[in-house]
Amino acid sequence: MARDALIQADQIMFSGNYTCALWRGFAERGLGVSSHWDAEMMWTPWGGGKRKDGFDVPEECGLVGIEKMKADATKNRRDEL
């Protein structure tokens, strides 16, 4: 998959400095860690398969966007108790 090739190129050329930024960009477009091809729909008339979207990033990249805001709010509520 081209996504994985770009992640690998970042590891080789930039020591992984942009890996999380790349994953976030992919995840925003449904190409996150859990995206995959649906095995039951591998053939379509136009020659491709049916992709299952994934909007997640690797754990080492941490939470982003709304998920980070939810986690921060929960942490703040616990700190107030």
Image (tube, helix red, strand yellow):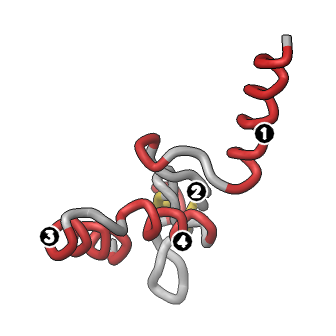
Say what secondary structure mark 2 lies in: loop
Reading the image, the residue beneath label 1 is 70
Q: Amino acid at mark 1?
A: Lys
Q: Secondary structure at mark 4?
A: helix
Q: Quadrant of the C terminus?
A: top right
- Identify the residue shown where x is 76% and y is 51%: 66
**How packed is label 4: few (under 14 Cα within 10 Å), some, or many (20 or more)?**
some
Q: Along the horizontal axis of the image, is 41 left or right of 60?
A: right
First in residue order: circle 4 vs circle 1: 4
| Vertical arrangement, residue 44 with respect to residue 64, above or below | below
Residue at 52 percent of width and 89 percent of height = 46
Look at mark 4 in the image and give the residue it sits on: 25
- Tell me which label, 1 or 2, sits earlier in the chain: 2
The residue under label 2 is 54
Q: Tell me the crowding category of disc 3: few under 14, some 14 to 19, or many 20 or more residues within 10 angstroms, Cα based.
A: few
Q: Relative to residue 33, is residue 13 depicted above or below?
A: below
Q: How many marks?
A: 4
| 16 relative to 72 in the view: left or right | left
The type of residue carrying mark 4 is Gly
Q: Looking at the image, is mark 3 or mark 1 earlier in the sequence?
A: 3
Residue wearing tag 3? 12
The span from disc 3 to disc 1 (Cα, nearest Å) is: 34 Å
Image coordinates of residue 67 in percent, x first then y, are 71, 45
What's under tag 3, amino acid-wise?
Answer: Ile
Residue type at mark 2 is Gly
